[in-house]
Image (cartoon, rainbow, N blue to C red):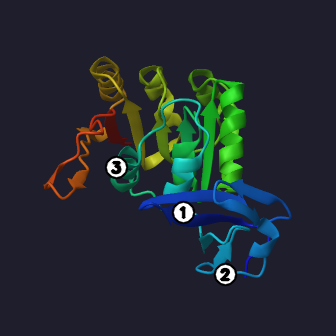
Amino acid sequence: MLTDELVLLKTSHRDKVREFIVKVCDDQLHTDFGIIELSSLRGKVFGDIVSSHKGKEFTVQCPKMPDHFRHAKRTGAPLMPKDIGMIIAYTGLCKNDTVLDAGTGSGILAMYLGSIAKRVVSYEIREEFVEVARMNIKNAGLDNVELRCGDIVEEIKGLDEKFDVITLDTQNSGVVVSAVKDVLYPGGFLATYSPFFEQTKEIRNAISMARFNDVVTIECMEREISFSERGTRPSTSKVGHTGFITIARA
């Protein structure tokens, strides 16, 4: 039964889904469908129905990481689920792994990693980004993600711990690569994200100099399929390219 955790309230209006992530508490949620007393969620279980004062019904669901992705506060363009999925798949990330993440941003990647890995340490150079990411991670209910404010270019040189997976999403990833093996377990994986060819080539050159193994750079293109009365076709509303993922193994 629900006590004080986060829940997803979902309803539909004119064939469109509307949803809200809220915490079970004594506050009220004001929506254009009416007011919901959040205290009424106590004692409910996922799948139950709550109603606003106008009688609009909401289904109570457990928020998953894609829900947090949609609702998290942004400080810039985060990694997209398709790219995050490739990082998780190609590194074989699991519940026993510890991860070093750099370029926290809004904390989206760190949240996905933290939902799987044993522990995540994430570095972000901008304090205001750290504060936003900290809030997003707290809202996701993750207590195994540690945020640190600092420049990974310098910070990595002083780390006295090792990691199973290292993810880099920074402008200086190519510079950081040379120090990665010092904090990466033998057989561990490095994963980098870079939006441009030039940065990707710099990263590949640095990986080659550092003598990593099993290096691959991938672009994941995504096309949503649109269904309508007129016909079925690839959607034209979304851009497929976001960036390049490079995976290398120590």
Q: Is the C-beta separation of discs 1 and 3 under 8 Å? A: no
Badge 1, how many Cα within 10 Å: few under 14, some, many 20+? Answer: few
Q: Give the side of residue 146 with respect to residue 197, left or right.
A: right
- Residue lying at the far front of the rendered structure: 54
Give the number of the mark in front: 3 or 2.
2
Between discs 3 and 2, the one toward the N terminus: 2
The residue closer to the viewer here, 23 or 230, is: 230
Residue at the disc numbered 2: 45
Between discs 1 and 3, the one toward the N terminus: 1
Real-space Cα distance between discs 1 and 2?
16 Å
Between discs 1 and 2, the one toward the N terminus: 2
Q: Is the C-beta separation of discs 3 and 2 under 8 Å? A: no
Q: Secondary structure at mark 3?
A: helix
Q: Is the C-beta separation of discs 1 and 2 under 8 Å? A: no
Residue at the disc numbered 3: 86
In percent of width and height, residue 176 lies at 49, 25
Real-space Cα distance between discs 1 and 3?
18 Å
**217 versus 59 height, above or below:** above
Quadrant in which residue 130 is drawn: top right
Quadrant in which residue 89 is drawn: bottom left
Q: Secondary structure at mark 1?
A: loop
**224 versus 78 height, above or below:** below
The residue closer to the viewer here, 72 or 90, is: 72
